[in-house]
Image (cartoon, helix red, strand yellow):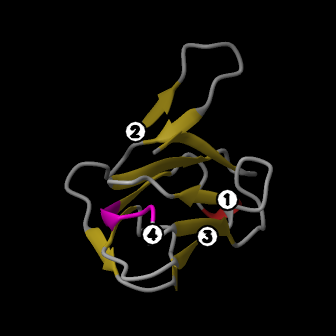
Amino acid sequence: MAYESPFKGGLKADISGSAGRNTKYVTASTTLTSYERDVSCAQTGTITLTLPDAGECPGAIFGIYSTVNAATNTITITSADGTVNGGSDEVINASSDGYAILISTGSRWLTAAVD
């Protein structure tokens, strides 16, 4: 099922298979596949998560969550195609459980929320 935004020129998101998705648990830097969309991080230091190329998963919504203090154990999110929100990365560095929601437009990654 595809969700189409009611806004002019809005984002189209593929929400098929969104219910009951598996969570990937990580403690170290890793490269995610287009199917590893829910990520729980229990990092003991700074880590980097690399998203797949935005063109591999148009409409995909990725949720990345830190279960530890991300202020001292930051999570840097990069992508295989080199950009997130037009820059080189996004960083989760909240003083408590931090998170980021990222959406693939099919040509680039956008950040919907970050804390």
Near mark 4 (Cα within 10 A), the count class, few <14, some 14-19 or many ≥20, is some
Comparing 27 with 108, the one in front is 27
Give the answer, above or below, for where 105 lies relative to 82: above
Mark in front: 1 vs 4? 4
Circle 2 residue: 1
Residue 100 disc label: none
User: Looking at the figure, which quarter contains the N terminus?
Assistant: top left
Contact, mark 1 vs mark 3 (Cβ under 8 Å): yes
Q: What label does residue 54 carry, if any?
A: 1
Q: CA distance from mark 3 to mark 2?
A: 21 Å
**What's drawn in magenta, residue-wise?**
66-71
> Going by the picture, which residue comes out furthest to the left?
20
Mark nearer the N terminus (2 vs 4): 2
**N-terminal-most mark, 2 or 1:** 2
Q: CA distance from mark 1 to mark 3?
A: 6 Å
The circle drawn on residue 72 is 4
Per the image, the residue denoted by label 3 is 52
Badge 3 local density, few (<14 within 10 Å), some, or many (20+)? many
- For the residues labelled 3 and 2, say whether their Cβ atoms are less than 8 Å apart: no
Picture quarter containing residue 51? bottom right
What residue is rendered at 59% in x and 65% in y?
A: 77
In this view, the residue in front, 74 or 9, is: 74
